[in-house]
Image (tube, rainbow, N blue to C red):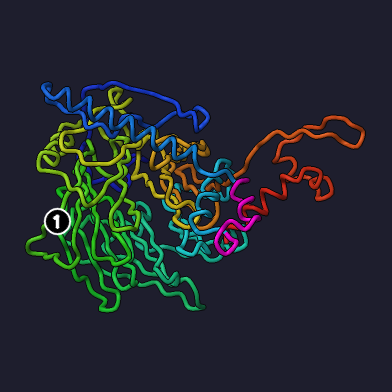
């Protein structure tokens, strides 16, 4: 009998095992108003050799110093009123904000309030914005792909497409770079390419010709020029399909088990990332890939369980990986892991005896643990929960936030937002009754769309509740929250100028 948790990874081997519990350290950030920090000592490379205590202490001092520098940098960031005053006094070049100033301002409008946009009859697996932010695509277990127009600050149903050869569910979707097509994958042997605009519907199957009968693509992505589609499958292979030639041009044996996520490093589409159930993130050079002898240019190791999602920063250097070990890790692809790190990850994964699809996280997974030997990650973030499905995590948009944050779904129904540089949890919005599988931050607006297994699609946008007091014409003190002021008529709203100030401020730098 099939369980509701037997989703994409139905071919998974049983995962999980107990690992020694480690010391937990929790601190609060004075600059963040006492919010809990995700991990405060994650960058400390704990040495398993007992004779290297002096090295550990030195690294501890260096890590503490770097944390203090990051917090000092946050405190020194100019306030919004200071930036506005300088602009009005002509202290900025060309009398306007630079792109970095815009990012500093808009990055403070962190989405924090949710409302339900849509309710579907089944689990929602995917929800992503197009690159220009004009469209939202959602994929549900009812075999329907829905496209919404988002150009006028609201979500209007634009088009509905019935998916073909779905099986369990649609597993992943991706927009083409020009925004005219999208592709989706499911438990079938093909990519499915569809047009977005035009009277005639184009729905083309792109066969991959795998060797396995029970086959699916867990993750896919377009190349930057839109000519190729890269996918990772449950047979451990990477597939590259050429749309113009209408043929599969590469099949690379990449991982021992399922390939759960793939991504490109930058706009050149020459460097590829792949992550699988073996807990390893492998880096490939498209120009040297050879089917007969596939060798990655490097491997990033440090997770204790399989990788569920990879997101590249797009600078050709940094990426994040989300994992079933309940951790997100930040990596620099220029620093590969040594053979000792690869062996440590493989041993940790092979020792596991719990399955994240239907079992709870073991108690000894709670808290901060020492890093595996050979772990070369830059940062580790741990407050969310990865269970039931391949939960996605991403960098926040470059245009509006400067990619200052990492946001992720969670099995508890919460959307978590981390500060990339300090590791602090800057926001967490509990907006669903079940697992949040996918999240998408609008490229230009302070809002996140989250898709959940409870059948809902929610919008998390920025809303600030501040208490104001002023005197009316009779000298009586009146109190209003900012939200109440926003909802009042224009006549009463003008009695507190902060309302127009806040909204006109945002519109002045967001475009």
Give left or right: position of 31 versus 307: right
Instruction: Give the labeled residue for mark 1.
Output: 296
Residue span colored magenta = 81-96
Q: Position of residue 56 (x, y in %)?
A: 20, 26
Give left or right: position of 419 versus 475: left
Identity of the residue drawn at 48% across and 29% down: 35
Q: Position of residue 298 (x, y in %)?
A: 16, 52
Q: Position of residue 320 (x, y in %)?
A: 32, 47
Q: Is residue 509 magenta?
A: no
Give left or right: position of 140 versus 228: right
Between 194 and 333, the one nearer to me in the picture: 333
Q: Is residue 93 magenta?
A: yes
Between 253 and 286, the one nearer to me in the picture: 286
Q: Residues within 10 Å of mark 1 (few under 14, many from 20)?
A: some
**Residue 357 visible to the viewer:** no
Q: Quadrant of the C terminus?
A: bottom right
| Majority secondary structure of magenta residues | helix
Quarter of the rendering containing residue 354 = top left
Identity of the residue drawn at 14% across and 56% down: 296
């Amino acid at each position: 009998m099939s369980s509701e948790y037997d989703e994409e990874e139905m071919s998974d081997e049983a995962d999980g095992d107990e690992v020694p519990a480690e010391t937990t350290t929790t601190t609060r950030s004075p600059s963040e108003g006492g919010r809990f920090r995700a991990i405060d000592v994650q960058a400390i490379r704990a040495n398993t050799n007992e004779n290297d205590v002096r090295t550990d202490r030195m690294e501890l001092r260096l890590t503490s110093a770097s944390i203090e520098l990051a917090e000092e940098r946050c405190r020194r960031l100019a306030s919004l009123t200071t930036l506005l005053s300088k602009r009005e006094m002509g202290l900025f070049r060309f009398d306007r904000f630079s792109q970095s100033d815009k990012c500093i301002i808009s990055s403070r409008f962190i989405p924090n309030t949710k409302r339900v946009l849509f309710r579907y009859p089944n689990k929602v697996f995917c929800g992503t914005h197009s690159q220009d932010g004009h469209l939202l695509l959602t994929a549900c277990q009812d075999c329907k792909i829905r496209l919404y127009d988002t150009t006028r600050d609201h979500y209007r149903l634009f088009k509905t497409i019935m998916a073909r050869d779905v099986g369990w569910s649609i597993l992943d979707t991706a927009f083409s770079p020009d925004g005219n097509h999208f592709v989706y994958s499911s438990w079938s042997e093909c990519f499915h390419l569809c047009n977005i605009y035009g009277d005639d519907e184009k729905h083309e199957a792109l066969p991959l010709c795998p060797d396995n009968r029970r086959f699916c693509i867990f993750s896919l992505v377009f190349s930057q020029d839109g000519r190729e589609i890269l996918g990772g499958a449950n047979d451990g292979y990477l597939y590259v399909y050429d749309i113009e030639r209408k043929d599969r041009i590469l099949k690379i044996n990449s991982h021992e088990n399922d390939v759960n996520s793939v991504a490109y490093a930058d706009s050149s589409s020459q460097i590829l990332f792949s992550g699988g159930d073996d807990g390893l993130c492998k880096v490939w050079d498209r120009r040297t890939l050879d089917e007969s002898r596939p060798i990655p240019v490097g491997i990033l190791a440090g997770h204790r369980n399989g990788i569920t999602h990879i997101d590249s920063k797009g600078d050709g250097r940094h990426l994040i990986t989300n994992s079933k070990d309940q951790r997100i890790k930040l990596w620099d692809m220029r620093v590969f892991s040594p053979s000792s790190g690869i062996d440590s990850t493989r041993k940790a994964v092979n020792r596991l005896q719990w399955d994240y699809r239907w079992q709870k996280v073991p108690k000894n997974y709670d808290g901060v643990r020492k890093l595996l030997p050979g772990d070369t990650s830059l940062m580790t973030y741990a407050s969310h929960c990865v269970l039931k499905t391949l939960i996605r995590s991403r960098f926040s948009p470059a245009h509006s936030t400067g990619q200052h944050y990492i946001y992720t779904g969670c099995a508890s129904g919460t959307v978590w937002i981390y500060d990339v540089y300090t590791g602090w949890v800057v926001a967490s919005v509990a907006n669903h009754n079940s697992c949040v599988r996918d999240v998408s931050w609008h490229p230009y607006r302070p809002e996140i769309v989250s898709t959940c297994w409870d059948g809902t699609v929610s919008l998390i946008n920025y809303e600030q509740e501040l208490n104001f007091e002023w005197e009316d014409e009779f000298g009586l003190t009146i109190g209003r929250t900012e939200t109440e002021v926003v909802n009042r008529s224009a006549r009463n709203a003008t009695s507190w100028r902060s309302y127009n100030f806040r909204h006109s401020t945002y519109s002045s730098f967001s475009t």
